Image: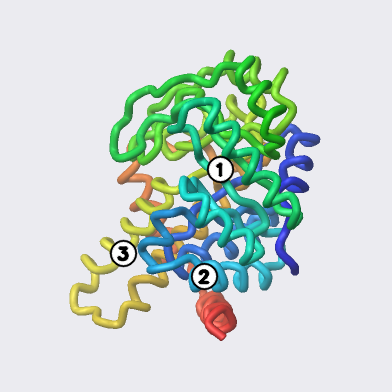
Amino acid sequence: MTTASMNALLAEAAEAGTAVGAFNVIHLESAEAIATGAEAAGRPVIMQISENCVRYHGGLAPIARATQAIAASATVPVAVHLDHATDVGLVTEAIELGFDSVMYDGAHLAYDVNCQTTAEVVRSAHDRGIAVEAELGEIGGKDGAHAPGVRTDPAEAVEFAALTGVDALAVAVGSSHAMRERTSRLDLDLIVRLAGVVPVPLVLHGSSGVADAEIRRGIAAGMRKINVSTHLNAVFTAAVRETLVEHPDLVDSRKYLAPAREAFAAEVARLLALFAGEPDAPAARETDAPAAQESAARAARESAAPADGERTAARTQESEA
């Protein structure tokens, strides 16, 4: 299947009153897990590559091409998105590499400069048929700080969308980046106000720190794209730790990365069901994150079948080719 348009995915979510899950790629294992989890859920998904990911891999092109290959081989719609890029040069490179969408984050700039720079990015991306997400307001938690940030002003958001032509807008409504405890409270009244006047889909960043029930309420209020990274990284790492505790003599990294990949995929599937508002979606998790992550890791290892491993290995070979 070819990769999907973020605009189309978000439009479908808006029509259904649901949200699309957007999960960060860290390495091949996480990209494979996102695709596998989305296939298990039977739901579309967005794979995101951040500036931190680019730095880790020493450049955008290698991890981008591998992620695009994994996305194209999936049996459900998958969009590949550049997340939180503050460097216009990196955005330009992503456009040239054929990303389905990009995010230019100029929220740290003066409002007028943010508008001007974002509008230039939008023109360049739209010329290539690529959607653009931007951010207005200050979402807490960047660089390890969990300050509440500055809430997005509805009137300013309407003006910003009109001046820039963005396709989606990340708004500051109470969540924080990089949180490991799911204790954030969303400003639901503000979300309702924003959704009522902003003409483009709203994006929730920092969702790792938001409990399931609160995410459901945020989606009902009008959020259409839900970004999750830290929570899934914690699930992955918990599975690695548990495997190495049980088998301390392992030296073949595949032996402990495989159960971690399965745990990650299982949580992706669970979150996608939650965001889609499925009535039989798994119950909300406890806020005791470590216990939940250990449980997910254990369940993934117990249920993993050889066929799944063979299938994922084949996908890895395809992405490396």
Viewer can see residue 200: yes
Q: Quadrant of residue 34?
A: bottom right
Indicate the secondary structure of the residue bearing disc 2. Answer: helix
Alpha carbons under labels 2 and 1: distance apart: 37 Å
Find residue 282 and name its label. Answer: 1
| Front residue of this view, candidates 195 and 20 | 195
Viewer can see residue 221: no
| Amino acid residing under circle 2 | Ala
Pointer 2: what residue?
61
Residue 70 lies left or right of residue 296; in this view the side is: right
> Residue 265, position in %: x, y?
51, 60
Whether residues under marks 3 and 1 lie with C-beta atoms below 8 angstroms apart, the answer is no
| Front residue of this view, candidates 236 and 122 | 122
> Residue 251, position in %: x, y?
24, 81
Alpha carbons under labels 3 and 1: distance apart: 24 Å
The residue mark sitting in front, 2 or 3, is 2
The residue mark sitting in front, 2 or 1, is 2
Q: The C terminus appears in which quarter of the rendering?
A: bottom right
Q: The N terminus appears in which quarter of the rendering?
A: bottom right
Residue at 57%, 72% (x, y): give it: 65
Disc 2 or 1, which lies upstream in sequence?
2
> Residue 155, position in %: x, y?
64, 15
Disc 2 or 3, which lies upstream in sequence?
2
Find residue 240 and name its label. Answer: 3
Whether residues under marks 2 and 1 lie with C-beta atoms below 8 angstroms apart, the answer is no
